[in-house]
């Protein structure tokens, strides 16, 4: 069966240059769930973009996090290549699937029905959202996700809740790569997604299997359907 791969990362906080080819396995689509910077400056964003644009993935998607303050109110970023998508309350369709990115602390009702892959920075309340003994999740996002039931909800923010969980028809992925000490300790998460005979990415409606594989000595988690 033909398949495509999605690589999910989050919360790199300016340490993206440490993500060498040993850590970033090949993937068709790379998704970053925000906190690309540590202090939210334009210089940090430009440094990230220069790195991100140069990566070999066919499509690259990112959203703003709570640290990325200079992007909070941005509607778009000028002169990005066509395959680099800053999803600030907007969607992009790839392989027949709809990817929607919600801006940090923006109205959850902007998330449209029919979203296949929801990308936010914040987790939903009580789902992979605990760090430093605090639940950082957003209850309004959780309510909206439960209403529209996307195939995937990809986020970060809670550094100590790196993991993956399936509830009903939605797979939740927290791919925060740093711990609360701001150390790079977690690996990107890769999803293998089947493509149907019309060239469309399948939604996450089947039971997934999770297992660890080694790629150049680095452990990543891969979900197959």
Image (cartoon, rainbow, N blue to C red):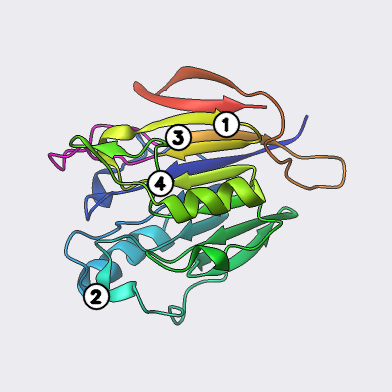
Helix, strand or loop at disc 4?
Answer: loop
Q: Name the front one of labels 4 and 3.
A: 4
Q: CA distance from mark 2 to mark 1?
A: 38 Å
Sequence-wise, the earlier of marks 1 and 3 is: 1
Residue 125's x, y, as percent? Answer: 40, 44
Look at the image and give the residue range highlighted in magenta: 175-188
Helix, strand or loop at disc 1?
Answer: strand
Q: Label 1 neighbourhood size at 10 Å, few (<14), some (14-19), many (20+)? A: few
Q: Is residue 119 above or below residue 192?
A: below
In the picture of the structure, the residue carrying the numbered disc 1 is: 167
Helix, strand or loop at disc 2?
Answer: helix
Kindly identify the residue that appears in the image at 81 percent across and 47 percent down: 199
**Is residue 133 visible in this depiction of the protein?**
yes
In the picture of the structure, the residue carrying the numbered disc 2 is: 42
**Is residue 32 visible in this depiction of the protein?**
no
Q: CA distance from mark 4 to mark 1?
A: 14 Å
């Amino acid at each position: 069966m033909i398949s495509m791969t999605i690589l999910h990362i989050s919360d790199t906080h300016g340490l993206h240059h440490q993500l060498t080819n040993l850590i970033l396995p090949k993937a068709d689509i790379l998704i970053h769930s925000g906190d690309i910077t540590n202090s939210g400056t334009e210089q940090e964003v430009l440094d990230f973009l220069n790195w991100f644009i140069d990566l070999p993935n066919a499509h690259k998607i990112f959203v703003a996090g709570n640290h990325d303050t200079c992007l909070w109110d941005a509607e778009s970023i000028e002169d990005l290549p066509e395959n680099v998508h800053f999803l600030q309350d907007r969607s992009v369709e790839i392989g027949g699937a709809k990817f929607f990115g919600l801006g940090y602390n923006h109205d959850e009702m902007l998330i449209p029905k029919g979203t296949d892959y929801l990308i936010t920075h914040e987790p939903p309340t009580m789902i992979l959202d605990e760090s430093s003994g605090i639940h950082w999740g957003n209850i309004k996002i959780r309510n909206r996700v439960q209403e529209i039931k996307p195939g995937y909800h990809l986020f970060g923010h809670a550094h100590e809740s790196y993991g993956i969980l399936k509830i009903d028809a939605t797979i939740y992925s927290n791919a925060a790569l740093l711990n609360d000490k701001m150390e790079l300790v977690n690996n990107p998460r890769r999803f293998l997604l089947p493509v149907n005979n019309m060239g469309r990415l399948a939604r996450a409606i089947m039971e997934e299997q999770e297992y660890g594989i080694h790629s150049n000595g680095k452990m990543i988690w891969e979900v197959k359907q």
